[in-house]
Amino acid sequence: MSDSSPLQLSDRPPEAEGHLLQVEDLHVDFHTRDGVAHAINGVDLHLDAGETLAVLGESGSGKSVTAQAIMGILDMPPAAIPTGRILFRGQDLLTMPDEERRAVRGPGIAMIFQDALSSLNPVFPVGWQIGEMFRVHRGLNRSDARSAAVRLMERVNIPAAKQRVNAYPHQFSGGMRQRIMIAMAIALEPSILIADEPTTALDVTVQAQVMDLLGQLREESGMSLILITHDLGVVADIADRIAVMYAGSIVESAGVHDLYRRPGHPYTEGLLQSIPRLDMKGEELFAIKGLPPNLLRMPEGCPFHPRCHRVRDVCRVDEPALREVRPGRRSKCHFAEEVLDE
Amino acid sequence: MTDDLKAFEVVDERKGSSRSEGVRSLRADAWHDLRRNPLFWISAALIVLFVVMAIAPGLFTNTSPRETVLSEARTPPSSENWFGRDVQGYDLYARCIYGARASILVGVFAAAGTAIIGTIFGLLAGYASGATDAVVGRVAEIFFALPLILGAVVILTALPPSDEYFVIVFKVVLVFWILGWPTIFRLMRSSVMQVRPNDYVQAARALGGSPWRIVTSHILPNAIAPVIVVSTINLGVYISAEATLSFLGIGLQPPTISWGVMISDALVAMRSAPHVLLFPAAFLSLAVLAFIMLGDAVRDAFDPKSR
Amino acid sequence: MFKFTVRRLLQMIPVIIGATFLIYWMVFSLPGDPTAGKCGDRPCPDAYVAQFEEEYNLNDPLLVQYGKYMAGVVQGDFGESYYGVPVSEELSERFVVTAKLGLMALGIEAVIGILAGVLAALKKGGFIDNVVLVSTLAVIALPLFVTASVLQLYLGIRWELFPVTVGSDTSFYALLLPAFVLASVSLAYLARLMRTNLSENLGSDYVRTARAKGLPQSRVVGVHTLRNSLIPVVTFLGYDLGALMGGTIVIEGIFNIPGVGNYIYRAINDRDGVVVVGAVTALILVYLFANLVVDLLYGLLDPRISHD
C-alpha cells in the first residue's frame, strides 16, 4: 500500500513489528465554560493492514472524538490533546508539522460521516467535490479530475454517473449522498478509511446496501476500515475485531466472534443482552440501568460502577486497567475472568 | 427580495425547534448568561437613564431649555453652563436633557408599533398559511420594497405640516410603522413556521385546542424571542433615522427640542463652536448604542454560538 | 435556472406596481394639500390649484390618476419641478454622478466589510475581532450626517486632505471621502453579518469534511466556507442599496455633490413635492431592479434555490 501513496513515508522504515495505526494512551479534553470535560481518557488501540476494527459505544462514549483525533480534525480549542501518541506507519501524527499531517488526510487516512447531506458542501456539484481530491493532492486539471470523479461514482454504483456528475448534493437521495461521500473518501486509495456511523441516518434497506458497498470496496482495495457505530447488528458481518468504548475509555477489545460468544466486560454483557433475538420471544428485553456519566464529573473508581450489576466495593474506589485477559482480548474490569468464565 | 432575508434573522434557527420543556431552561440559561454580561448592565443602565430623562427632565436640571441669552451664544462649556450655550444662546445641557423625550418617544412607539403590527400579521400568515399567507406576504413585499429613508422622505413631504408637539412626533412614528412592519412580519412568520411543526403544537391541535389558544399559549411564547431582539435593536435604528429626517428638515421641527434638530442646527457653527455639535451627538449616539447593545446582549444570551 | 429567472421576473411586476401605487396614493390622496407650500407661505391662488389638479389629473378616480401617472413614468415623464424644468431632464444628468458615488460606496462596503468580517471570524475573541466589534458598533450608533460633518471638518477643512465640497468636479478622488462616509454604516452591518455567518459556517459539517479531505486551510476557508457565507451577504447588499440611496440624500447634501440625492435634498427644502416624488420613485425603481439582479445572483450562488 505504501508504494502507491504519494507520501514519501516509505523512506523512513516503519517500526519493526509496528502496526499500520497505533494509538497509545490518547487523552482528549474539552475546555468548556463549566470546566474541563475529559472526553477521552487514555485510549489504546491498533489496526493492521486490511483489518476491520469496529469501535462500539453509546453516544458520548468518545468514539467519534477518537476518530476525529486520529483524523486531526478536532477543533483545538476547545479540544486539547494533553498526552498520547497516534502512530501511523510508525510516525507520530500528533508531533508532525501541519503540512505533513494534512498530506496524510486523503491519501493516508480518509473519513466519512453520519449525515452526508450536511457533510457535503451544498453549493458545489458533487463531481467537483470528488474531483477536488485529485486537483489538490495530485494536481490534476479540471477535466481529468472530472473524469476521475465519474469513474469513482461508477465504482460506488451511482447510476447515470456521467449525467449526474454536475448535480448538487440536494438533488440526490440519502443513500446516494453517502455513496458520494464514500467515493470522495476512497478517491486517493487511502490505507485506512474511518466510517463514523455511516448508516445511522439511512433507511434500513439502504443501510445494508451501503454496508455491502463498504465491505466490497475493502475487499477490492485491501484498505483497513475503522467502523464507528452504536449498532451491534451492523458490526457482526464486517468487522474482524471490536473495541467497546465507555466514558472515554476502551473497556473491552476482542475478536468479533470471541466477543459475541462470550463478553469480557459487564458493559458488553449488557449491550449483548439488550439486542432483541428471535429465541427470546416473550422474555423481557434487558436494558442497562442508569445513564452514562457526566464527563465533567466522573465517578470515583471504575467509571461504569454506578450502572454495573456486578459492582463490588473495590470498583467504587479503584479504577481497573485495560489488561490482557486472554490471548488477543483485553478487558477493563477487575472481574473480567469471572465474567468470561460464567 | 428573497424570502429568507438572513440579515435580519438574527436569532438562531434552531431556537424555534427547541423542545417545549427545553424552553424554560433555555430562558433560565439565557438570563444566567445575561447577568454575567457587563454590556447588558451598561446598556440597561443607559436606557433607564434616558427613559427617566424623557419622563422627568426636571430631575436633571433646573434651567429652562427655552431660556435664551443671545449675548452668550456659542460660549464653550463652563462651570455655569456645563455644556456651554448653542448658536441661539440656549443652555446646551438643559436642551440635551429635554431632547431625550422626543427621541425616546419616537423610538419606543415606532419599535413597539412595528413589533405589534408585524407580530399580528406574522402569526396570521405563519399559522393560517395557504391563501392568507400568500395575500399578506404579497402586501408585505410591496411595503418592503420602500427603503426606510426614501419612503419616509416621500410620505413626510406629503403630510401637512403641523405645530402640535405630539402630532409632529406621531407623524414620524406613523411613517416608521408603515415602512417598518414588514421586517418584523417576515421574522415572525418564519419563526412561527419553525415552531408550528413541533410536537407540543401538534399535540395541542390533536387535543382540539382552539386556534386562538394554540396561537397565544403555544406558538407566540415560543416564536417571539427573535422579534424582541430585533425590535430592541430597531429602537436604536429608529432614533437614528428620526435624527436623519430632522436633519433633512422633514422630521421633527423647531420649536420641538430634539437631538436631531440640535445637531442639524449645530452644523452651521461647527467650525467655530464644535461643542454645540458634540454634546447632542454624544447623547444621541449613546442612546442608539444602548439599544443596539442591549439587543445584541439578549441575542447572544439566547444564542451562545453567535458570540 | 431559466425557470427561476422567469419566475423572479414575474414576481417583480406586482411589487413594482404595488410600490409605485403606494407612493402615489400616499402622496396624492392622504389628507393634506399637494400644493401646500408651493406658493411661499400663503395658500396658492385658485387658478394655480386648478392648473395643478388638471396637470396631475387629481379630479379623476384614484386608479385612473395613478394609471396616467405611471403611463408618463414609463415614457420617462416624472412631472415638472416648481421652476418648470422636467424632472426627468434633471434626473438623467444627475443619475450618472449618483451611480458613480453609489458604486464606489458599494465597492468600499463590500471589500472592507467582507474583509473585516472574515478577519474577525477567523480569530474569534482575538484582538482584531474586538477591534471590529467595537468600531462597527460605534459607526452604527453615529448618524450618517454627524459622521459626514465631522469628517468634512477634519479631513476637509482642518487637514485639507480631501476637497471640502465636490461641486462640479466629480472625479474619483473628490468622491472618495463622501463615498467612504456613505458606505460606513452599511459596512459596519456587513462586517458583523459576515463575521457571524462565517464563524457559523466554519463549524459546519461540510467544513469538517473539507478538512478531512486534506485541503489546505486557505482553501477550506477561501473556497468552501466563503462561498456559503457570501450568499446572505449578497442578499444584504441588495437590500442595503435602499439605505445607501437614502444616504445619498444626506451625503450629497452635505458635500454638495450634483447627483439625484442632492436634487431631492434641495427639493425637500423648496417643498417641491413633484420633484421629491418623481426622483424618489425613480430611485426606488432602480432599487427594485437592482434587487432583481441580486436575486438572480443569489440563484447562481445557491443551487438549492435555482436547481429545484
Image (spheres, rainbow, N blue to C red):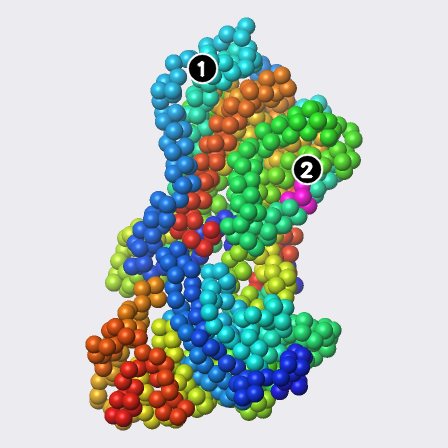
**Which residue is drawn at the image coordinates 59% and 71% (left, top)?**
A96
Q: Label 1 sits on what residue type? A: Pro
Q: Is residue B138 left or right of residue A286?
A: right
- In the image, residue A222 sits, relative to residue A302, either above or below, namely below
Q: In terms of secondary structure, where does tag 2 sit? A: helix
- In the image, residue A47 sits, relative to residue B72, either above or below, namely below
Residue B132 appears in the picture as rendered:
no
Q: Is residue A32 left or right of residue C220?
A: left
Residue occupied by mark 2:
C179
Q: Chain of mark 1?
A: B
**Which residue is drawn at the image coordinates 45% and 44% (left, top)?**
B296
Viewer-closest of A17 and C154: A17
Residue occupied by mark 1:
B65
**Which residue is drawn at the image coordinates 50% and 74% (left, top)?**
A85
Q: Which mark is residue C158?
A: none
Viewer-closest of C153 and B13: C153
State the image quarter where residue C4 is shown.
Answer: bottom right
Q: Which residues are magenta?
A: C105-109
Viewport quadrant of the C terminus of chain C? bottom right
Image location (x, y in percent) of residue A187: 62, 80
State the image quarter where residue B273 is shown.
Answer: top right
Q: In terms of secondary structure, where does tag 1 sit? A: loop
- In the image, residue B14 sits, relative to residue B295, either above or below, namely below
Q: Are marks 1 and 2 in contact (CB under 8 Å)?
A: no
**Which residue is drawn at the image coordinates 57% and 84% (left, top)?**
A15
